[in-house]
Amino acid sequence: MSEPAPKRTSLYDEHVKRGARMVPFAGYEMPVQYPSGILTEHGWTREKAGLFDVSHMGQCYVSGPDFETTAKAMERIVPADILSLVPHQQRYSQLLSEDGGTLDDLMITRTDMDGTLYVVVNASRKDHDFELIARHLPKDVTLDRRDDLALLALQGPKAEEVLAGLEPAVRDLKFMHYMDATIAGVGVHISRSGYTGEDGFEISLPDRHVAKLWNLLLSDPLVKPIGLGARDSLRLEGGLCLYGHELDETTSPVEADLKWSISKRRREEGGFTGAARVQRELAEGVARKRVGLKPEGRAPARDGTLITDMAGRRIGIVTSGGFGPTVGGPIAMGYVETNSSAPGTSVNLIVRDKPIPAQIVKLPFIPNRFKR
């Protein structure tokens, strides 16, 4: 059977108009780069403000009769502490399988509507995730899938300046919190979050108005459109996980060094899908860990590259790798045996059947500049 034709976000024509090279990604035709190229786009986002079309992501609302009911329902599905969220606060978590593997990672926000959570999941997993969440909710809690919403990400040190020119209140918005606003007559949901390691915002709005906001933001000389290529190099330098690479159904959040996303109460109480493995690994440790890798020379080590110790014994595998424009050389992330995971450990990366010397390094490669 042939693959279904890729979908298009409502900004497809805008991307083509600006000369984007479109590629299939997560079931969509998405811009991988614009004419200026990935290196320029990466640097622009690190220095000014990059605008990303992330409308392929999955957005939904999970609603119950009151906040406690809805939060407890979600806590049976994810390991994050949802009950402690205050209105307008956002939290990162994961969907886990019964044996503790990661089915996806997601963002969960407590809205100011009592009993309603706003949830964003990865594009490649949204059908799976929405079905899974809905299946595990009690009868008085429902999932409302919102395919009528688009999503933009404005990222970089000048993002606040740009967006404050349209809505001054964003200057006071805290990291991992959201606000509702009206920009150019359009109601928007703005969260201070992102996937680049830089300060920035994600903006949800009705799909029918997204081209208007896209072009309004791009009318600011501090803003340029950024494609998937730079999005990946930015998140890699920031040490951020990508589902299907650092996270998959075999990997637990403890192995992935995401323990920080599971509060003390949830660690102790459990009660979420996959809790037995998570609690065991927290108590006893893990056999492998996610680490940063800095190869010597200029050759990048791509995902799937084998990692060996200096004696040639296989100890792990690269999950993401490429050139780090801000780092100025190749970088990678991967999993290695715990006893070989200390920063400074020398390893070899087997690239084209040849060992490339590398060192285990602390993540992130570039310090994150989230506005706390």
Image (tube, rainbow, N blue to C red):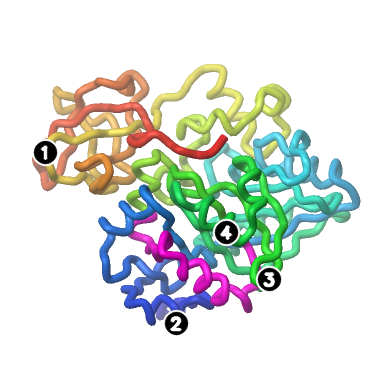
Closer to the camera in the image, 322 or 273: 322
Q: Is residue 110 above or below residue 345?
A: below
Query: Real-space Cα distance between discs 1 and 2?
Result: 40 Å
Q: Which residue is mark 2?
A: 13
Q: Kindly report which numbered mark, 1 or 3, lies closer to the viewer in this rendering.
A: 3
> Which quadrant is the C terminus positioned in?
top right
Amino acid carrying label 3: it is Val
Circles 1 and 3 in contact, beta carbons < 8 Å = no
For mark 2, give the secondary structure: helix
Mark toward the start of the polypeptide (1 vs 2): 2
Mark 1, secondary structure of its residue: loop
Q: Position of residue 221 (x, y in %)?
A: 41, 64
Q: Which residue is mark 1?
A: 297
Identify residue for label 3.
Answer: 186
Residue on which disc 4 sits:
165
Looking at the image, is 190 positioned above or below residue 361? below
Residue 172: percent from left, percent from top: 65, 43
